[in-house]
Image (spheres, rainbow, N blue to C red):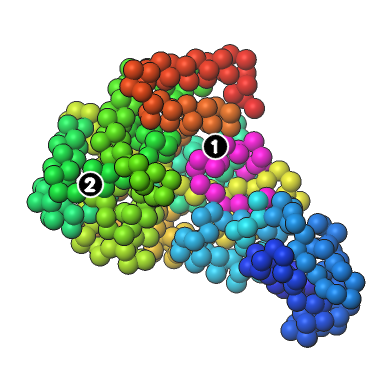
Amino acid sequence: MYKTVAIKNKILGLLETSPDDKRLPSARTLASEFDVSFQFVQRVVDDLAERGLLKVFPRSGVEPHPYWRERMVNGVFRVHPADNWLIKELCVKINRDIPEIFISNEFDNAPMELSVSHYLISNHSKYCDLTAMLNNVVPDRRTIFGKILDAGRFGRDLCGIPLLFSPKVMILNRKIFEKCNCELPPENWTWDEFVKTLQCLENKIEPFRTFGTWAGLTEWMNFVTVNGGYIFDPDNSNEVKIDAPEAIEALEFFREISKRAQLPPRYIGKYRHDIDFWQGNIAIYSGSRQTVSMLLKMKYFKKEDIVLRPMPVRERGMAPRSMLAANFFCVRKECVDMEMAQQLLGLLLSHECQNDVIGSSRCGIPIMSRAAQASFDNDDPHDAVFARTLFHVVPRYNIANPVSYHLVNRGIEAALTGQESEFKDKVKRVADALRMIAQFGLDKS
């Protein structure tokens, strides 16, 4: 059994790393590598061919099937983002403790997945309700952040379990502030102070490098949230709130600061704010504890070069609320081995992973409360900001339908980037479309 799994995983690994038109090593080559018979390897190859992953040419080799990425293969765990160093460390634990699992970043469909918030929102109907599985793995719910679990809940179903999470904050590049002779903003800064900070920075650097942002849901929703706004009312999922005064006010402010930082035409389609920030060229960037950890781990910044501030608020005294950033464990409805999925969830929520990997790395906040507490350093100014905003984090976008998700994402982007005279009308049209979806019950599917 062990060698069968090892050979299967070897072939899956070759699929992911080899060009699609390149033939794979022959069964005889693999038999020699694993010290088994040719017939033993051939059975594994034939099984993968029947599953639609391989094309077998008698006496001349094996090729990847053109559509292998679309197949559902038992034991595959798809991780996103695959280049995250913490994810790689977790995968080392998985390979050691559950070698039957193949960790992938190429399969479009996998029975088990690690995903991010916006992907879960738009694909939650494809995933199982994990309530019973979580009860088996964590029978005492007092040991886990219950509020954060709501981020993966759609209706009654728990479609994703956040393994780690973080509030969103503003990450400031100290060196650019010093270069621009611009004072760092106060911790309890307001929208007016945010604009004044951008104006100060604009005197020395290009405006689009003052604040690295774009008109996506994960960006503008932070400002709507901090102003007390919502897309849908959290207490009444049929009540649309995206065109309520507090949401409109926040969207107008985000539109204003986005226009200030608008890309010059020569950069459009050729530029990414996140890469420019990593390279030290942007003054302010919104991110999470995961972002900060990555910046330090990959040595893009020294710790003293990063300054954190909570999200700026409309007026002093308001709570520094922000949206949740999280990585979710999900299981597709096509999964045939729920026992393996539960075993994997148990490992990912174990002390070894939650405390010794996620907690000790301080890459995000572990979902298990004891590991979360241990991960904070009381003397670290970065942790002080995350600790302060932790209790004001908003776990849900309150979107329960992929159609609503895409409508909001694309519709509000069009409003933010279009003509100012059409802004409110476009937001109203998005809101009315959402109301129609809710009226006919389409938001429940």
Q: Amino acid at mark 1?
A: Ile
Look at the image and tell me whether residue 321 can be seen: no
Q: Tell me, for residue 220, which label it has, or none.
A: none
Residue beneath disc 1: 121
Q: Residue at x 54, y 42 (%)?
A: 119
The answer to which of 416 and 155 lies nearer the viewer is 416
* Stretch in magenta: 109-131
Q: Residue at x 18, y 58 (%)?
A: 175
Q: Is residue 111 magenta?
A: yes
**Count of residue discs:** 2
In which quadrant is the C terminus drawn?
top right
Look at the image and tell me whether residue 427 can be seen: yes
Would you say 308 lies left or right of 86 here?
left
Q: Are marks 1 and 2 in contact (CB under 8 Å)?
A: no
Q: Residues within 10 Å of mark 2 (few under 14, many from 20)?
A: some
In which quadrant is the N terminus drawn?
bottom right
Q: Amino acid at mark 2?
A: Glu
Q: Is residue 47 above or below residue 274?
A: below
| Helix, strand or loop for disc 1 | helix
